Amino acid sequence: MADNEEINDRVILLDGDDVSEGSRSSLYPYEPTLNDLDMSAEQFSVYEYLRQKGKGKIITQPDFQRNLVWKDKSKSKFIESILLNFPIPFIYLNEIVEKKGNTAESKYMIIDGLQRTSTLESFYKNEFQLTELDAIPQYNNCTFETLPEILRTKFEDKKLNIFVLKPSTPMEVVYDLFNRINTGGTQLNRQEVRNCIYIGKSTKLLKELSEQDYFKKAIFNGVSPIRMKDRELILRFIAFNYFDFKKTYDGNLSAFIENGMKEINMWDDEKLNDVRTEFKRVMEWTHNIWGDNNFRIRTEKTRGTINMAIFETICHTVSKMSDDFIEKNKAILHENYSHLISNEIYYDAVTRSTNSKTKVDDRFRLSENILKQGTHA
C-alpha cells in the first residue's frame, strides 16, 4: 500500500507546464543496467525504528503532515497485519547529511512510509484504539498498553524493511524511483520530491512566500497549494531572477531550478531578505497593473488559468523596472500585455515545448521588448 497518497488533491494543470523535460533518449544520466542504484537495505525492529525517530534521526517533512489521512480503521488493519506477522511494504528514507563544524551527521527523511510511521508511533503512544479487526476481533478497542504482553512484544520486535536512498543519487533516478513505488494512488510530483531532497533555507523560504496574502492576491488563488505547485511557481521566479539563465540554462528546467534550491540553501539572511522584498514588490505591482488577469491567457468564456511561463517572464521584466518607471508607465504596460500575448512567437513559447532553451530565450526577450514599447524613461 503506497500510504502517502490516499488523498484526492485538486491538481491544476497549468498552460505551458510541460510534462516531458530534457531530450535524453534515456531518463537516466548513466547506463542503468551497468550501474547499481546508490541505496542500502536496512532492517529495524519497530521499537528501534521509533526510538531513532524519537531521537530526531528519522524525520518527516512538515509539509506532508497534511497527508496523514488514514482513519482508525485503516490504522487498525495495519497494526493487525503486524500482530499477525504479515509482510508489510518497504519504507523509503532519503539520507540527508547535515554539516556541523568539522563533523557531519546523517538524518533520514521519510519519503514513502509516512502513514505507516505515523500509525506505528501513534499506536505505541496509546493514541487510538484498534477497531473493526477481522482476524483477531477479540482485540478490538485495545490500545497498545491494554494488549497482552505477548502481543506488545510481537509489535515491538516486528522487523521493518527499509531502503535508504543515498545523497549521491541523481535526481532523475529519484523521480523515477518514487514514481514506481507510489503505485497505489497519486504519485509525489517533482516539487514534492524536491521539497524532501533539498530541505533547508530554500524549502522554508518557498513555504513562507507561498503563504503571503500579496502572492495569493497576485495569482487570484489560481494555483493550488495542495501539491506545492504554488511553491514551484515561486521557485521558478527566484531561479530566473537570481541565476544567470542566459548562460546556465540548457533546456533542463528541473536541473535548473533544483540547482537553484541548492544555491538558496547557502544564501545568508541578507540575500534571503532581498528576495523577500523583491518578490513582494513584483507581486504587488503586477496585480496593480493587470489585476485578476495577471499571468493568464484569456479565452472567449474565461480569463484562463495561471501560466507558469508567463509568470516567469512578466515577473522578470517587472523586476528590472524601478517603482518610478512603473508608476509613470502603468497604463502603457497594462495595454502592452495584450500585444505580448497576441505575439505568435511569444504565445508559442509559453504554450508549447516551453522548457527548450530557444523558447525560454524567446519569451524572456519578447516580454521585455514588447512590454516596454512606447514607455517613457
Image: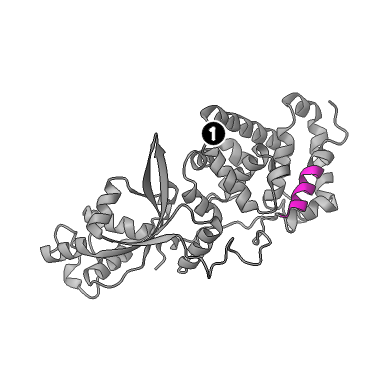
> Extreme front residue here?
34
- Return the residue at label 1: 267
> Extreme top residue here?
324
Amino acid type, label 1? Trp
Vertical arrangement, residue 331 with respect to residue 55, above or below? above
Which residue sits at x=30%, y=58%?
119
In the figure, is residue 96 to the left or right of 236? left
Instruction: Give yes or no for residue 14 being in the magenta stretch.
Output: no
Where is residue 289 drawn, in percent x and y? 74, 35
Which residue sits at x=67%, y=49%?
308
> Between residues 130 and 65, which one lies in front from this camera angle?
65
> Extreme bottom residue here?
135
Dominant SS type (magenta): helix
Q: In which quadrant will I find the C terminus?
A: top right
> Between residues 183 and 69, which one lies in front from this camera angle?
183
Instruction: Give yes or no for residue 363 being in the magenta stretch.
Output: yes
> Between residues 317 and 328, which one lies in front from this camera angle?
317
Q: How is the image coloured?
A: one colour
Where is residue 305 drawn, in percent x and y? 68, 52
Where is residue 148 drawn, in percent x and y? 11, 64
Where is residue 82 drawn, in percent x and y? 25, 68
Which residue sits at x=48%, y=53%?
168
Which residue sits at x=74%, y=56%?
351
* Quadrant of res 87: bottom left
> Magenta region: which residues?
356-366
The crowding category of the residue bearing disc 1, from other C-alpha atoms within 10 Å (few below 14, some 14 to 19, many at least 20), is few
In the figure, is residue 248 to the left or right of 170? right
Vertical arrangement, residue 159 with respect to residue 103, above or below? below
Q: Is residue 85 visible in the rendered structure shown here?
A: yes
